[in-house]
Image (cartoon, helix red, strand yellow):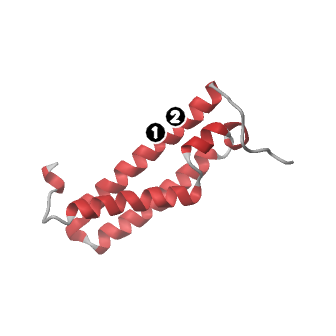
Amino acid sequence: MSSIEGNGNSGIAFLVAAGIVFEIIAFACSSPQTAEINIGTRGGTLMKWVHLGEALGAAFVIVASMVDPKRAKPILAGGAVAIASSEMFYRHAKQSGLENPGPVTEQRYT
């Protein structure tokens, strides 16, 4: 962890970077819980939107690291942790929903 230690602001930069990635993915997707419950209606597009949210989040984090090069390491680390976490959560939600379907809260109209 010593590679991202700084003057006390590095922790804040890490949290802000992680927070923006989670916010952007929430903007692009619903929660993993809702995705799991409604995988029957969302399964075909879920990971597409997760990946688009992750890409947009990564772009913001990269720009932030360029704007604030002194805190680039914690900014990039926070973004990377958030992207990896969201990928794991949504993959788990999809798999769990497919393996254990329960009552859905959405209907698909065609």
Q: Is residue 27 visible?
A: yes
Q: Determine which residue is flagged by label 2.
A: 92
Residue at image position (32%, 55%) is: 78
Place of residue 20 in the rendered image (x, y in percent of width and height, measured from the top left): 42, 62
Amino acid of disc 1: Met
Is 105 in front, or is 44? 105
Q: Are marks 2 and 1 in contact (CB under 8 Å)?
A: yes
Tell me if I can see residue 58 in this picture: no
Q: Amino acid at mark 2?
A: His
Residue 70 place in picture, x, y as percent:
20, 69
Q: Where is residue 37 drawn, in percent x and y?
A: 64, 38
In this rendering, the answer to whether 88 lies above or below 31 is above
The crowding category of the residue bearing disc 2, from other C-alpha atoms within 10 Å (few below 14, some 14 to 19, many at least 20), is some
Determine the residue located farthest toward the right in the rendered image: 110
Most extreme residue toward the bottom, as rendered? 67
Residue in the foreground of this view, choosing between 73 and 110: 110
Q: Is residue 75 left or right of residue 37?
A: left
What SS does tag 1 mark? helix
Residue assigned mark 1: 88
